[in-house]
Image (tube, rainbow, N blue to C red):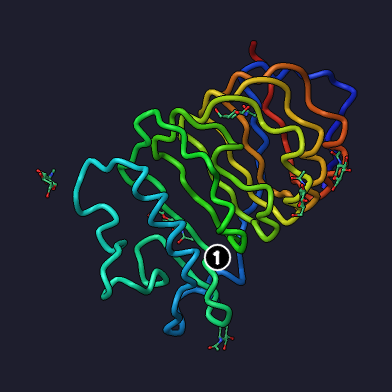
Amino acid sequence: MSRLSLQTAITVKSFLLVYLLGSVVVSHLDSGVGSLKTKCIDEERRALLKFKDNLKSYNNDTLSSWGYEEEKKDCCSWDGIGCDNISGHVIMLNLSHLQLSTGGKSLNPPLTELHYLVYLDLSGIDLSGNNISTLIGNNMFSLQHLDLSSTQLEGSIPETFGNNMTSVSYLDLSFGYLTGPIPNSLGNMTLLTHLSLSYNDFTGSIPESFANLETLHTSILAGTS
Ligand SMILES: *[C@@H]1O[C@H](CO)[C@@H](O)[C@H](O)[C@H]1NC(C)=O
Ligand SMILES: *[C@@H]1O[C@H](CO)[C@@H](O)[C@H](O)[C@H]1NC(C)=O
Ligand SMILES: *[C@@H]1O[C@H](CO)[C@@H](O)[C@H](O)[C@H]1NC(C)=O
Ligand SMILES: *[C@@H]1O[C@H](CO)[C@@H](O)[C@H](O)[C@H]1NC(C)=O
Ligand SMILES: *[C@@H]1O[C@H](CO)[C@@H](O)[C@H](O)[C@H]1NC(C)=O
Ligand SMILES: *[C@@H]1O[C@H](CO)[C@@H](O)[C@H](O)[C@H]1NC(C)=O
């Protein structure tokens, strides 16, 4: 349970890795997904279809369960989607390592309709042409697990990024083209247990607000320029 030692001024130029010892389980996800036949919510389905339409896939089978057809109407049964078994809201979007690409196009506006998401994993898909703001709404209040590693995201982390995402316990933004400072607002994510920012082009040092992150079981492997 060590706090971060902030005495050491650590440069986070291109390499910051905060590790957790132990694993993260989004516990109410296991229970909530797929246990009942839920009908998905129309505006969330439309948002997902729009998201898919903006992605090229290298293989026609990828996300073939997603579609406008009547028999595909229940987005809760689509690949990579999980819904809350009571409210029907989409709480999981997991496209991890599917062969999908924006082709450099901005997805703007971001996924603001999916504001009940608890688990969002887009790791390994090609989101070039996008930054965090064109992708993630500022209203994902329930998010606990956010993995945007290896997605070719660019730009800086929005200054207010952590303010509305205080439930996040797992955050991985590693292996991207992110620049600029690591914002103070990450210190508002007080439930973080896993944080990985490594292999980006951040400048500056670790914000002092990280001292708030008491549950981060950390060793920081930082350094290199
Ligand atoms: C939803 O999932 C939870 C956790 O598994 C379960 O306890 C609950 O009974 C489910 N709700 C319904 C309406 O089936
Ligand atoms: C995917 O479907 C389109 C249109 O149906 C077809 O022209 C194309 O050859 C298919 N691509 C692959 C990789 O199967
Ligand atoms: C998300 O997808 C990846 C790759 O298919 C899989 O390994 C992982 O278990 C999935 N996560 C959840 C919570 O279903
Ligand atoms: C947080 O959410 C509120 C309510 O939706 C919104 O008005 C505010 O702009 C958000 N703040 C940030 C920093 O995104
Ligand atoms: C993200 O991209 C949008 C559209 O290109 C731009 O307006 C915005 O300033 C960028 N934000 C960040 C934080 O880089
Ligand atoms: C945490 O969020 C609040 C607004 O929700 C903001 O006023 C405060 O500056 C944030 N703290 C940090 C360290 O950014």
Q: Can you tell me which quadrant of the image ligand 5 is in?
A: top right
Q: Is residue 31 visible?
A: no
Find residue 172 and report its horizontal and vertical position in percent: 59, 41
Find residue 20 and report its horizontal and vertical position in percent: 66, 45
Residue at the image point whose x is 43% and y is 29% from the top? 128
Q: Nearer the viewer, residue 49 or 6?
A: 49
Q: Answer with the quarter of the image where residue 12 lies.
A: top right
As helix, strand or loop, the secondary structure at mark 1 comes to: strand
Q: Which of 100 and 70 is in front in this view?
A: 70
Q: Can you name the residue that lies furthest to the top here?
A: 225
Q: Can residue 68 be seen in this view?
A: yes
Seen in the picture, residue 98 relative to 133 is either above or below; the reply is: below
Residue at the image point whose x is 71% and y is 31% from the top? 220
Seen in the picture, residue 223 relative to 120 is either above or below; the reply is: above
- Residue to which mark 1 is pinned: 91
Residue type (three-letter) at the residue carrying disc 1: Ile
User: Within 10 Å of the Cα at label 1, are there few (<14), some (14-19), or many (20+) other Cα atoms?
Assistant: many
Q: In which quadrant is the C terminus drawn?
A: top right
Q: Answer with the quarter of the image where residue 100 lies.
A: top left
Find residue 86 and report its horizontal and vertical position in percent: 57, 82
Residue at the image point whose x is 83% and y is 18% from the top? 9
Q: Nearer the viewer, residue 38 or 218?
A: 38
Q: Nearer the viewer, residue 104 or 176?
A: 104
Seen in the picture, residue 23 relative to 204 is either above or below; the reply is: below
Q: In this view, does 215 lie to the left or right of 108?
A: right
Q: How many marks?
A: 1
Q: Answer with the quarter of the image where residue 208 lies.
A: top right
Find residue 182 and report its horizontal and vertical position in percent: 73, 28
Q: Is residue 88 left or right of residue 183?
A: left
Q: In this view, does 40 lie to the left or right of 102?
A: right
